[in-house]
Image: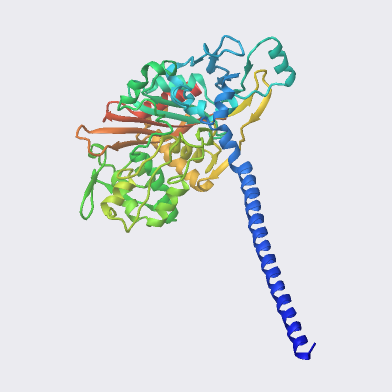
Amino acid sequence: MSRRTSQLESEGANIKSTKGKKVKRKRNIQALVTTLIFTTVFLFMIGYYLYFMLHDAETVVMNSKNPRIEEKAKTVVRGTIYSSDGKKLAYTDTNGTPDNFDDDKRRYPYGKTFAQVVGYTTKGFTGLEDVCNYDLISTDTSVLKQLEQDLNHDALHGNDVHTTLNTALQKTAYEALGENRGGVIAMDPDTGDIFVSASKPSYNPEDLDEIWEELNQKSSAPLMNRSTQGQYLPGSVFKIVTTLAYMRQNEDYQDFSYHCGGTAKFKNFSLSCYHKNAHGTENLENAFAYSCNGAFATMGLDIDTDIFNRTAQDLLFNNPLPLDDLKTQNTSYVKSGVFSLDEKSEKYNSYYVAESSIGQQDVLVSPAQMVMIASAIAKNGVLMKPRLIASVKTQDGDVVSEAETGEEKQLMTKKEAKQLREYMSAVCEYGTAKEFSQSSYTAYGKTGTADLTNNPDGKINSWFVGYAKKGKKRLAIAVVLENVDNGSVSAKNCAKDVFDAYFE
């Protein structure tokens, strides 16, 4: 074999070896890429599983539309919802057999009085029946107890929900609304416990199947809980927000002075006080006590837009309200207020700002939000965590879970709260709610009369927001009477009935 032939064979072998290495390297790269893809997918699935277990699992499991929940409800007698004073607000009337629930009937002993807050289980789920659905059809009784019930052919009973609602106070509030549309909500500023959540018009949940179509056709919306879901023009109760914003901007706010002649004239518009009453020369306390529109429009025009917006946000506007006991995955049974001044908006001008400062224009609030503000003022600026559910217990009374208590948020400083209390005290001593001055308790409040837009009949929303104390007992309240004749009824009278029942 010649040297040339040997060299060619050697080069050919090298070429084959190089090609083999390239093919092997290419296969290694493909295997590495495939491994990385599968590893990434695997890690993503593990991550999503952990996220689901920590974040979404409970929500999905507790969703009333979950088919597993529906199946579970067929084998467990739905638990009872109790008031804080041990009265049944909702319970299941059953024949007691574990395999035939067809004759079971959900009963609501107080009918219309608690309808919206307790809710219903027919035509879907609402209110506490919705929020507590999983607890009510789950049983945490001991295994021995369940075995005993099974041997005796007794039906398994779901857990019971114990609320903070007070039956006597709820009845008083419901009756105090009279024939008016409106809502009342009352809570303990020191604990966050909600004692009252009343709404009119109402309905009897036991009759829902028969009256469903009729209820849905009514423009009065009886299915809505006005105390938590209603959004209303606040009128002068919004002056609490305006006052706080003005105080934050002006350290010398106590030097405020305004002369009220009944009608305030500005560059391109004028605003009148109630019945064009002339209040004379006022400081900030007098302006607050007499609810002087001219004074507050003047203050509103002076407040920096950013300070106004931030103050409203601190007081829970444009944010979800912290009442988790009325929230589910798909529904919130509580609404927050709306307030925003935008200098770039087409609506923004002096008149718009002045009207917004006295709770008109696009400002909206719910009684739930206003009672939280009043509660924080009563407790040195601190809002305690609002709650409707105190605990979940087994049929035998063993505690399954208890609601957390504690501070929710600092809405304002201690000094600011103290100053607002002084102004709200003046309202009830000699101002627009002086009817409280002869009470056995001390009242603090703010009245409101919101002029409804596009209303030729002169209808208004009547408001009272505040709290009262006697000894160590305190109660915060927000009342709205919707679309009533000006001067015919007043929300402060409704609030007084509730205060009287609570303290006297």
Q: Quadrant of residue 462?
A: top left
Residue 132 appears anywhere in the view: no
Q: Quadrant of residue 155?
A: top right
Residue 43 placement (x, y as % from top left): 66, 52
Question: Where 69 falls versus 171 (above or below)?
Answer: below
Q: Quadrant of residue 113?
A: top left
Question: Where 3 falls versus 338 (above or below)?
Answer: below
Q: Nearer the viewer, residue 263 or 207?
A: 207
Q: Does residue 343 appear to the left or right of 227 in the view shown?
A: left
In the image, what residue occupies the spot 50% across and 46% down?
411
Q: Does residue 293 appear to the left or right of 112 in the view shown?
A: left
In the image, what residue occupies the spot 51% across and 28% down?
130
Image colouring: rainbow
Q: State the quadrant of the N terminus.
A: bottom right
Residue 477 appears anywhere in the view: yes
Residue 292 placement (x, y as % from top left): 31, 43
In the image, what residue occupies the spot 40% across and 26% down?
199
